[in-house]
Structures are given as structure tokens and as C-alpha cells.
Amino acid sequence: VAADSARLGPLLVVAARLTMGIWTGGKMVVEQTYIGEAAAPERTTKITSDVGVYAVLGFVMGPTVGAALTPVDTHLGPERLDQYTAPGYLMILLCACMLVATTTTFDPAAGYARRRGPRLGEDESRRRLKPSPSSEAEPDKTGLAILLACFLAHFYSFAIQETITTPFVAARFGWSQREIDYLFAGVGLLSLATSCLVAQLATCCSDLGLLVLSLAFGFAGSLALVDQPLGPELRRSTFLFGFALITIAFPFGRNVALAMFSKVLGPTPQGSWLGLMFVVGALPRCLGPSWSLYALRLSCTLFPHPQPCPPGGRTCLEFAINAAFFALCLALVLLRRASLLPFDQRHPALEQPTAATPL
């Protein structure tokens, strides 16, 4: 809002984006840490998926709300309310509502699944959530590393997808901006439907099975997007098929990997570990855009035939690497699945007492 009327507008926009990034990243870590420590283990995946549904709903509804506010052109007292400032005022209102609701209704000390008895204060809850010194056991580091790799694979794929799609389809297939907008709208709806499906499957399917399914989808989608000379000519229908598979894979992989990571950690304090996981997920979004666009051009140098290089570059190098990464993660998950067992199954003698009313 302030950037619209200030000479330092571009700098304020950058500062606002930085602040929103810090807020969003910190919020996700706090949310998942609380879910991992407070929820009953059998409900961790379901609750993580439910939170994911609302996150995806925001991605879908955000552009829709922005488009609906485009015709706005009025004044709010001395302030101008138009297509640029109206979304900002709406965000201020929503953030204020979240702040009030969280402050007045959220009690982090209530409902911990790994305790029983009367309600405890926050400090006492944290103390009891930790294993006693005499029975201290560490989570399986191999399992945590494998889940971090799976998380990285899905976020790397997602970063590539959101980066190259617009310039690539415009150059390769000659799509207009409206057609690209339709594509992303469809992707948003598909991602929302998949997130809802994951939330339901979490109640009847194993976490391991859902993780394997996500990696298989990612592998198949990446293979479908490998073009000549390492694959067949990339047609529009093949591109849409691979794009859809990767879109489906991401909600599965993100939500299930997060939930399994929390379960492998068990009573271990989870804040720093989950912070590490989200840092791993953020790396592809920081480095992926520059690499992914460069890889499209690099492929034409490494694989000059068949000539000429198609408009937009070749996807063979980029998605071949992506497919190999998914295949490696899938092999590790299948070969070391014992390392992915929840903490309380690996250390049944240290299993924490359950709460009377867990999340």
C-alpha cells in the first residue's frame, strides 16, 4: 500500500516481499512443529494434509480475489483504493483478523497427545514431551536424511515447474498469456483436489505407501517431460500429461514427507529440525529459477541434434536429472524403509503416554 504512493516504491515492494517470506517461512515451521509435538501420531499425516489443503486454497483463491479487485477505483478517505492498493488493504485486514483470533483463541498448552492427566502449563508440557535423560534415544538419522532428500526432490520439481512454464510454453507452443493463465488455474484446482484426496487417504493408507506413490508420480511426470534426443518429441499433450503428474506428486510428497519427518523425530524437540527441512525446501526455489532456465539453453549445446534447437530450448537435461533424483529417492525409501518407521515403533519402551483428548 505504501509503495503505491512513495518514490521508493520498488524498494518497499522488495522489503515487503522479504518480510512476507520471513513471516510465511516462520509460520510454516511453527505450525508443523506444533502439529508434530501436539497431535497423536496416527493423526499427524491427516492434520498436516488438512493444513496443506488450506494453503493450496489460498494459492487458488489469491489470483481470483486479485482479479475481482481489479475494477476497484475509489478513495478511502485520503487514501486511494485501486487495483494495486486494494489487495494490500485486504491483506492488512486478514492479517489483523489472524492476529486477534490467534491471540484470543489459541492455547498451545492444551491437547498434547503425548501426555495424560490434567492440563499442564506450557513449560511443563515441553519438559514432559522430552525423553528423560536415563532413557534418551535419538531419532534415526538415516530416515531423516532420506525424508529430507524426498522433500528436496519434490520442491526442486515444483520450482522448475513454476519457473520455466510461462516462457517455455509461450516459445515452444505459442501460447498466449490467457492460455497460460488458464493452465495455472487448472493446475491450482488439480493441486487443491489432490490435497483434499491426500487428507482422506491419510486415514486409510500407510504413510510409506503415499510417499512411494508421490515419488512414482514425480518420476513418471519427469520422464514424460524429457524431450529429444533423450526422449520422444515433446508434444503439447505429452507436456500437459507430465505437468499434471508433477502437480499431483507435490501435495502428496510435501504433506506426507512432513508428517513422516515429525513421526521419525518423535519426542525429540522438533523446531530446529523442521526449520532445517523448510530450509532444504526453500533452496530449490532460490536456486531453481536461474538453473532451470539456463539448463534449457545448455541442453541445446550438449545435445545439438536433432537440429535446429526448438524454440524455448530442450527439456531433456533438466527433467532427466529430475527423474533420476526421484528414482534415487524412491530406491532409498524402498531399501531403507525400516529407517522411516515412527520413533515410538523403533523405541516402544520409550513410547510416551497418550492424552485424554489429543488433537
Image: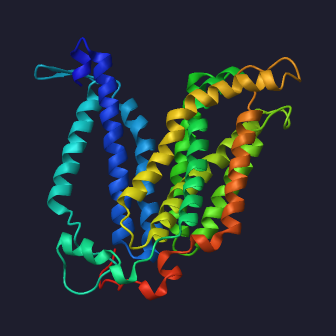
For residue 173, say whether it is visible: no
For the view shown, which residue lies furthest in the right direction? 306
Q: Is residue 190 above or below residue 39?
A: above
Horizontal and vertical percent for residue 298? Answer: 73, 24
Q: Is residue 50 above or below residue 3?
A: below
Colour treatment of the image: rainbow
Name the one closer to the observer, 57 or 6: 6
For residue 203, say whether it is visible: yes
Horizontal and vertical percent for residue 214? Answer: 63, 58
Name the one closer to the observer, 358 or 129: 129
Name the one closer to the observer, 337 or 165: 337
For the view shown, which residue lies furthest in the front direction? 134
Q: Is residue 55 above or below residue 120?
A: above
Q: Quadrant of residue 318?
A: top right
Horizontal and vertical percent for residue 14? Answer: 34, 25
Q: Residue at x 60, y 36 (%)?
A: 160
Q: Is residue 161 above or below residue 116?
A: above
For the view shown, which residue lies furthest in the top direction? 7
Q: Residue at x 77, y 38 (%)?
A: 226
Q: Residue at x 56, y 30 (%)?
A: 289
Q: Residue at x 59, y 71 (%)?
A: 339
Q: Is residue 273 left or right of residue 326?
A: left
Q: Quadrant of residue 65?
A: top left
Q: Is residue 158 left or right of residue 227?
A: left
Q: Is residue 24 left or right of residue 229?
A: left
The quarter of the rendered structure image containing the N terminus is top left
Horizontal and vertical percent for residue 306? Answer: 89, 23
The quarter of the rendered structure image containing the C terminus is bottom left
